[in-house]
Amino acid sequence: MGAFGIGQSVTRFEDPRLLRGEGRFVDDVNVPGQAHMYIVRSPHAHARIRAIDTAKALAAPGVIAVFTGDDLARDNLGTMDMTLKRKRPDGSPMFARPHTGLSRERARYVGDPIAVVVAASRAQARDAADLVVVDYEPLPSVTSTADAVGGAPVWDECPDNVSNVFEAGDRAATEAAFARAAHVVRRRYVITRVHAQFMEPRGVLGVWDAGEGKWTLYADVQYPHRTRNALASRIFKVPEHMIRVIAGDVGGAFGTKGWQYAEHRLVLWAARKLRRPVKWSCPRSEVIMADEHARDNVTDAELALDADGRFLALHVRTLANVGAYVSSDRNLLATFSNVGTLVGVYTFPAAHVEVLSVMTNTNATAPYRGAGRPEATYVIERLIEDAARELDRDPVELRRRNIIPAESMPYKNALGYAYDSGNFPKGMEEALALADYKGFAARRAEARARGRLRGIGIANAIEKAAGPQPEYAEIRFDPSGGATVLMGSKNQGQGHETTFKQILHERLGLDPHVVRYIDGDTERVAWGMGTMGSRSTVIGGTALWTAADKVIAKGKKIAAHLLECAEADVHFADGKFGVVGTDRTLAIADVARAAFQPGRLPRGLEPGLYETGTFSPAQDTYPNGCHVVEAEIDPDTGTVEIVSYKLVDDVGTVINPLTLKGQIHGGIAQGLGQALMEQVVYDAESGQLLTASFMDYAMPRADDFCDIEVHSNPVPTRLNPIGAKGAGEAGTVGALPAITNAVVDALAAAGVRGHFDMPATAERVWHALQEARRG
Ligand code: MCN
C-alpha cells in the first residue's frame, strides 16, 4: 500500500544518519572514568600453563589491575554449558567443554584468553600486557579437520577428539538403494575455515551502577535479551533485571557476533570489582585470533543413480571442526539443524547423513551467514556437476530429471524437511534463460579465441530459515498521535528500521516519518530472541503485524464511539477507520489521540494505545533460488574473474526489492570471498595461525565482482500472514557452489581431471592447469 508499503523499493531510513557518521557503534560509547582492558592471549596452539607472573605488569604506568583465571575461579563465575543432549559414536555422552573466561591450566588455541590488564588508557593496557610473563610448556596440537580423529588430544579426557555424532535420514534404505544403483559417484569436498570480517571489530563496555545495583553492558551482539539471560542465569547467577544490555548500531555481525564471548563477562566482572567502567575494543589485528570462526569441514559424499540418471540415494559423512571449546548449541548449529538441505531441491527416495563434530586446537566455530546451508548446497550441487561429468551427461538435464516438480509441493524431503512452498523448476528455467545458458558455448569459444578459459556454474540453493522460535514487537502510540515501534530483533545492517516501518505502513497506514524505531535495549524492549537465521522479517514482521491487528481491534471500539455507530459497522483501511456505507472516517492518529482522553472513550474501555505481538511460526520457511555464474581464467596466471552472475530467487513476498537486492549482493560477496580467496590457515606442525591479519587473509574487493542481476520468482508462503520467507543468507547459500562450479567447469574444459577444492586462488588454479598439462 502506498509509497512506503510492502513491495516498494524504499531507500533506507537509517542511512542518512549512518552516512553522516552519526551512527552509535560500541566504540562510540564512552562514559566518564572508564578504564580499558587488554587481553593477553596464548601464542601457542596447545600449551600447559605452568605459571603466570603479573608483578611487572601491575607496576607499569596507568595499570589498575591484572587478572587471571584464578581470580575468576575465586569469584565462582559460571560457564556456558552445553544443553544439547548428544552421543559420541560409542554411545557415551557427548564431550563438550565450555570456555571459563580466562584459561588456567592449559591454552588450547592461538588466541585463547589467559589474562587481562586493566589500565587508564588503551595504550597503557596494551603496553603492560607485554609484561605479563606466562610460563608455557608447548604441547602437541592438531588443527586440521581431516587429521583431528587420532591427532594429538585437545582434551586428555577425550583422546579421539570426537565431541559427538549427529545422524539423519534412513541408513538401511540408503544402503539398499546403493546396492541396486547403476552408478555411484563418490567425492570428497573440503569447505575451508573462514572469519566473518565485520567492518566493526567486536567491542564491549561494562558499567556497574552501585546505586541501582545493576550492570549495563554495551555490546555489538545479535541477541541482546539472550545475552542478558546467559550472563545473568549462567555466568553471574543473578536475576535478569540486574543486567541491562544495549546494542546500538552494529557494523556487521553475520552470525559470529552471536551472543556470548568471554569479553562480555570479563568487562562486567572487572567493572564491579574495580568500581569503574571497563571497556574492551578488539584491535583489528587481533580479530582472527579473538573471534569465533566458521565452516571448516570435510565431507565424503556418495550419489547413487539408476541407469536413466535418476537419483536413488545420497550418503554423506562429514567431519565438522568445532574448535577447542564447545560452549553452546550455537557451536554445533551448522552440524545439526541444517543438514536436511543436503538433498537440495531434488526427489531423493532415500538419504543418510552422519556428522562427526571433531575438536581441534582452533577457535570455536559458530554460525556464519548460512550456518550449514551453504555447506549443504555446496555438497549436493558440486556432486551433481561431478556426476554429470563422470557419466557424460548434461548437468542441467540431470537436474531437470530430478528436480521436485511444482505439483509435488508441499514436499517432505528424504531427510525429513517439509518444503512448504516454491516452484523450483520455474526458478531454474528462468535463471537459465536470464543467463542465456543456450548461448554459453559461443561465449566459451569467443573467450578461447582471447586466450581465456570460460566456465559456467549452476546451483539450485535451498535453505531452512525462520524456524519455530518466537519474536516480539510493540507499537506504542503517544498522546499526540505519533508512534514508536520496539522490536525484539536486532538490526546489524539489514535495514530493519525500513523493513518494519514498511510493514507498519502497510497494515496501519502510518507515515514512516512519524514513527520512531527502537531495538537492541533490554530495558526499552520488553523481550526478544534477536536476529539470526534470516528470521527477523518473517517472525518479527509477523509479531508486528499481530500487534497492529490489536491496535486496529481497539481502535475500532474508539472509532465506533466517536463516529456514533456500532463497532461491527467500523472498517479499517488505508490508515482510516470508516463507517460502512458512509464517507465518514477518522484517521488512526485521531483515534490514537482520543485513546489518551478518557472523556472521549466508550464506558469501561481502558485508556491508552500500546499493543504487543509475539509470534512463533509453526515451521521453517524454505527460501530458494537458482544461481548461474560464468567465470574466466587466465591460464598464464591462474587468475579467476567472475564475468556473469545471474540469479532468480524466491523469498516469498518481497518487502523491499531494493534492500533485498542489497542483502543478496552482500551474501554473494561473502560466498565469493570464500570460494575464491578467503581462508583461515594454520601451520600443520606448530598449530600457529598463519593468517592473522589482512596481510595474509585475502578479502574480496569491489573489482572482484561483476554486475549481479537478481530476479524474483516469489511463491508466498502460507506460514505467516505476510507471505514472506527469509532472505538474509540466500546469496551466500548459492554463491559458494555456483562460483566453484563455474571455476571447475572452466578447468575441466582445459583438461583438469583431478579434484579441485576452494579457494580458487590464482596459485591453486595455475597449479591445477600445470598438472593437467603434464598429463
Ligand atoms: N527482505 C525482504 N523481503 C523478504 C525478506 C527479507 O525485502 N521476504 C529484506 C528486508 O530488507 C530485510 C532483509 O531483507 O530487512 C533481511 O531480512 P531477513 O531475511 O529477515 O534476515 P534478518 O533480518 O533476520 O537478518 C539475518 C541475516 C543473517 S542470518 C545474516 S548472517 C546476515 C544477514 O542477515 N548478517 C548481516 N545480512 C546481514 N547484513 C548486514 N549488513 N550485516 C549482517 O551482519
Image (cartoon, helix red, strand yellow):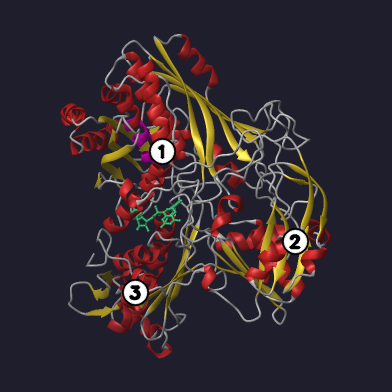
| Magenta-tinted stretch | 733-742
Tag 3–tag 1 contact (CB < 8 Å): no
- Image: 126 above or below 752: below
For the point 26% across and 75% down, which residue is it?
Answer: 576
Can you identify the residue that label 3 sits on?
Answer: 556
The answer to which quarter of the image holds residue 772 is top left
Q: Position of residue 771 (x, y in %)?
A: 40, 20
Q: Position of residue 637 (x, y in %)?
A: 34, 33
Nearer-N-terminus badge (2/3): 2
The verdict on residue 741 being magenta is yes
Q: Label 3 sits on what residue type?
A: Lys
Give how far apart the Cα atoms at labels 1 and 2 are.
Answer: 41 Å
Q: Position of residue 335 (x, y in %)?
A: 55, 37
Which is more toward the observer, 511 or 50? 50
Mark 3 vs ligand 1: CB under 8 Å? no
Q: Label 2 sits on what residue type?
A: Leu
Nearer the observer: mark 1 or 2; the answer is 2
Q: Label 1 sits on what residue type?
A: Ala
Magenta stretch: dominant SS? Answer: helix
Nearer the observer: mark 2 or 3; the answer is 2
* Image quarter hosting the N terminus: bottom left
Q: Position of residue 552 (x, y in %)?
A: 35, 70
Can you identify the residue that label 1 sits on?
Answer: 675
User: Secondary structure beneath disc 2?
Assistant: loop
Which is more toward the observer, 367 or 693? 693
User: What is the number of the mark on residue 131?
Assistant: 2
Question: Residue pushed farthest bottom?
Answer: 599
